[in-house]
Image: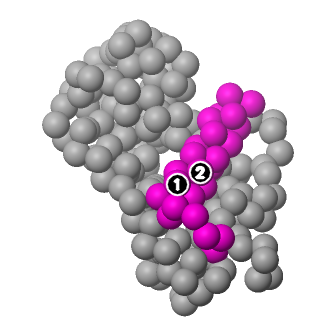
Amino acid sequence: MSIRHEQKEQRKAVILKSALDLFIRKGYGETKVADIAKAADMSMGLLFHYFDSKEKLYEELIRIGCERLKMDFHFYGESPLDTFKVVVEELFTMICTNPSSAKMFVLMENAQHLENLSEDIKEMLTEADKLIKKSIPLIEKGQLLGEIKQGNAEALAVTFWCSIQGIAQYIALHPDTPCPNTMWILSILENKEVN
C-alpha cells in the first residue's frame, strides 16, 4: 500500500470517527458537515473529497455497523447455547476493546427512529433488525434440546439482544465501565434446571 493511499485511509477513518462521535452526541439532524470537518481537523472541501454529503457519510457508518452485526448462526456448531456464548464473547470483546464499536450500537439504534433516510439506509437497517428474527429458530432448537429455557422464543430473543444493546449504549457513554461477564447475559437464555 502506498503512503498516499495509507494517508487517504487514515483521513477517512478520522472523518468516520469524528462523524460517529457527533452523530451519537448531537443526532443526525443537528450535526452539520462543518462540525464534522472541524472535529476531523480538516477543511470542508477535503471532507467532501471523501464523502459527497452528510447523508453519504451517515450511510457509510450504517453500512459499517451492519457489517459488524452480520452473524452466521449456523457456523458455531451443534449447541445453540454454545453458539450464543461465542456470539456474546465476540460482541463483548469488540465493544470493550474498541470504543467505536459501542458507539456504533448507539448510532444504529438512533437511526431506527429517523424518518427521512434514503431507501439504501432503510434497507440496511431492515437487514440489521433481522438479527432478533434470525436467532428465534436457534432458541427454539435449544429449547428442544433442553439447553435453553422454555418460553416464547421471540420474547427471549428480544430480551437477550436488547440487554446487549443496553450494555453497549451504556459503555458508549461511559467507556471506563468494566465489561460484564458473558455468562450473565447467557443466563437470560440458559435452562438452569438441566445444567
Q: Position of residue 121 (x, y in %)?
A: 25, 38
Q: Position of residue 140 (x, y in %)?
A: 49, 74
Mark 1, residue position: 155
Mark 2, residue position: 159
Quick check: 130 above or below 25? below
Position of residue 63 in the picture relative to residue 41 (left or right): left
- Check if residue 160 falls in the magenta segment: yes
Q: Which residues are magenta?
A: 148-174
Three-letter code for the amino acid on which mark 2 is drawn = Thr
Q: In terms of depth relative to the viewer, which is nearer, 174 or 84? A: 84
On-image quarter of the N terminus: bottom left
Position of residue 106 in the picture relative to residue 176 (left or right): left
Q: In terms of depth relative to the viewer, which is nearer, 121 or 45? A: 121
How far separated are the C-alphas under marks 1 and 2? 6 Å
Q: In terms of depth relative to the viewer, which is nearer, 180 or 151? A: 151
Q: Position of residue 193 (x, y in %)?
A: 78, 77
